[in-house]
Image: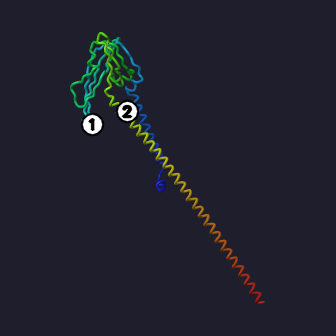
């Protein structure tokens, strides 16, 4: 009970509200940023098909490093340019490798090495609107889904290989862990608030009981005081009557 007396419920409620608002804002901003990424926007975009011809191929190589020069990795992006019937040329990333360390030789890619310049076929892809492509770039704004070669060029079908599945699983696990931590934090705060409110109610009840006991003790004391005064007055009245009786008896004796 002594701990409950020093607890400031108003301050705790303010802290709880601030923490809850902060968590909601962080989750809202994170969700907003995730929904604005091309990977999420591609989910709502319909796939497009077109008869195309391969007019160019290239491999983009770049290295990245973490803070202090640690964690160096080499990223190979395999890109193929397709020419559409209207004459426009669009470049799509058909495969991608991310290797640790500094790598010079590009690894083998079934899609990139299986499609040759001059091949014709049906391309299935997704593409963001012009504003999205201008924001994210042509490579990030387009997604390669499938390329079906014409029979005269081999008649093979090429589908992208998800090489980042492990990273996606780790990212999803991390998101679930963060969500679980947030839920656990809110539940702990709610339980703490309930316990604190219960302790405060018990403390108020104890104060009320003490006040009632104090009031009852004061009533009892005042009643005893009245009884004592009444007894004293009765004693005084009795003594006074005795004195008057003795005085009358002395007068009678003198006569």
In-front residue for pair 155/191: 155
Q: Which residue is mark 1?
A: 67
Above or below, 26 against 45 in this view is: below
Distance between the Cα atoms at labels 1 and 2?
24 Å
Which one is in front in this view, the residue at disc 1 or the one at disc 2? 2
Q: Residue 90: where, in percent of width, then height?
A: 33, 17
Residue 187, percent from left and from top? 45, 42
Which residue, given by chain and number where applicable, does mark 2 sit on?
172
Q: How many marks?
A: 2
Q: Quadrant of the C terminus?
A: bottom right
Q: Looking at this rendering, what residue extends furthest in the top direction?
A: 152
Query: Residue 69: which quarter of the image?
Result: top left
Residue at left 31%, top 27%?
A: 163
Q: Quadrant of residue 36?
A: top left
| Rendering coords of residue 219 (x, y %) | 61, 64
Report the residue that reaches farthest toward the bottom: 254
Q: Residues within 10 Å of mark 1 (few under 14, many from 20)?
A: few
Task: Name the residue located 67 percent from the left edge and 71 percent from the top edge.
Answer: 230
Query: Tell me, what colour scheme is on the image?
Result: rainbow
Please report contact status of discs 1 and 2: CB closer than 8 Å, yes or no. Answer: no
Neighbor class of circle 2 (other Cα within 10 Å; few <14, some 14-19, many 20+) is few
Does residue 57 appear to the left or right of 248 in the view shown?
A: left
Q: Nearer the viewer, residue 68 or 209?
A: 209
Q: Could you say which is closer to the camera, residue 193 or residue 24? A: 193
Q: Residue at x 46, y 55 (%)?
A: 3
Q: Nearer the viewer, residue 180 or 42?
A: 180
Q: Is residue 251 above or below residue 145?
A: below
Looking at this view, name the residue that lies furthest to the left: 104
């Amino acid at each position: 009970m002594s701990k409950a007396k020093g607890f400031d419920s108003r301050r705790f409620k303010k802290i709880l509200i601030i923490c809850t608002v902060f968590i909601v804002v962080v989750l809202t901003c994170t969700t907003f940023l995730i929904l604005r990424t091309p990977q999420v926007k591609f989910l709502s975009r319909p796939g497009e098909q077109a008869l195309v011809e391969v007019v160019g191929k290239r491999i983009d190589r770049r290295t990245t490093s973490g803070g202090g020069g640690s964690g160096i990795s080499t990223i190979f992006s395999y890109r193929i340019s397709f020419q559409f019937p209207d004459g426009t040329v669009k470049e799509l990333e058909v495969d991608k490798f991310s290797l640790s360390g500094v790598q010079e030789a590009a690894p083998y890619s079934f899609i990139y090495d299986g499609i040759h310049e001059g091949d014709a076929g049906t391309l299935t892809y997704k593409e963001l609107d012009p504003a999205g492509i201008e924001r994210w770039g042509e490579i990030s704004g387009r997604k390669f889904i499938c390329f079906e070669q014409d029979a005269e060029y081999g008649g093979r079908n090429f589908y992208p290989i998800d090489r980042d599945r492990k990273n996606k699983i780790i990212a999803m696990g991390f998101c679930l862990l963060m969500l679980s931590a947030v839920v656990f934090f809110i539940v702990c705060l709610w339980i703490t608030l309930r316990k604190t409110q219960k302790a405060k109610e018990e403390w108020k009840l104890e104060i009320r009981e003490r006040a009632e006991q104090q009031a009852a003790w004061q009533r009892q004391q005042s009643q005893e005081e009245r009884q004592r005064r009444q007894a004293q007055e009765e004693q005084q009245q009795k003594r006074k009557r005795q004195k008057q009786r003795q005085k009358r008896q002395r007068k009678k004796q003198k006569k």
